[in-house]
Image (cartoon, rainbow, N blue to C red):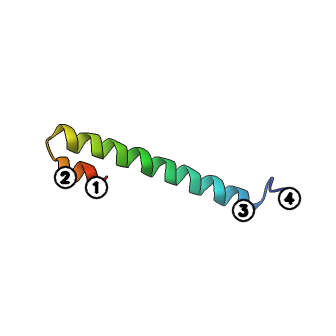
Amino acid sequence: MDLNGSNTLQNLKDAFAGESQANRRYLYFAAKADVEGYNDVATVF
């Protein structure tokens, strides 16, 4: 199945990029909460 140039391929790329960025944000805020002493908040992320 060739997906080159299809909307499906673009949707998959967009979804992957969005999820990757969200993951990085969660890790950043978890580390920031941990440094600031909010250990309970850090575990949520």
Q: Quadrant of the N terminus?
A: bottom right
User: Which badge, 3 or 4, comes first in the chain's sequence?
Assistant: 4
User: Which badge, 1 or 3, comes first in the chain's sequence?
Assistant: 3
Residue 15 drawn at (x, y percent)? 57, 57
- Circle 1 sits on which residue? 44
Residue 19 drawn at (x, y percent)? 50, 53
Amino acid on which disc 4 is placed: Met
- Residue found at the far left of this picture: 37
- Label 4 or label 1, whichever lies nearer to me, is 1
Q: Residue at x 18, y 47 (%)?
A: 39
Q: Secondary structure at mark 1?
A: helix
Q: Secondary structure at mark 2?
A: helix
Residue 5, quarter of the rendered image: bottom right
Q: Secondary structure at mark 3?
A: helix
CA distance for labels 2 and 4: 46 Å
Classify 10 Å Cα crowding around label 3: few (below 14), some (14-19), many (20 and above): few
- Circle 2 sits on which residue? 40
Q: Residue at x 25, y 48 (%)?
A: 42
Observer-nearest residue: 20 or 34? 34
Amino acid on which disc 1 is placed: Val
Q: Are marks 1 and 3 in contact (CB under 8 Å)?
A: no
Report the side of 24 relative to 33 (left or right): right
Report the side of 9 relative to 29 (left or right): right
Using the image, tell me which numbered label, if any, was put on residue 3.
none
Q: Secondary structure at mark 4?
A: loop
- Circle 3 sits on which residue? 8
Residue 27 drawn at (x, y percent)? 36, 44
Q: Are marks 2 and 4 in contact (CB under 8 Å)?
A: no
- Circle 4 sits on which residue? 1
CA distance for labels 3 and 2: 39 Å
Amino acid on which disc 2 is placed: Asp
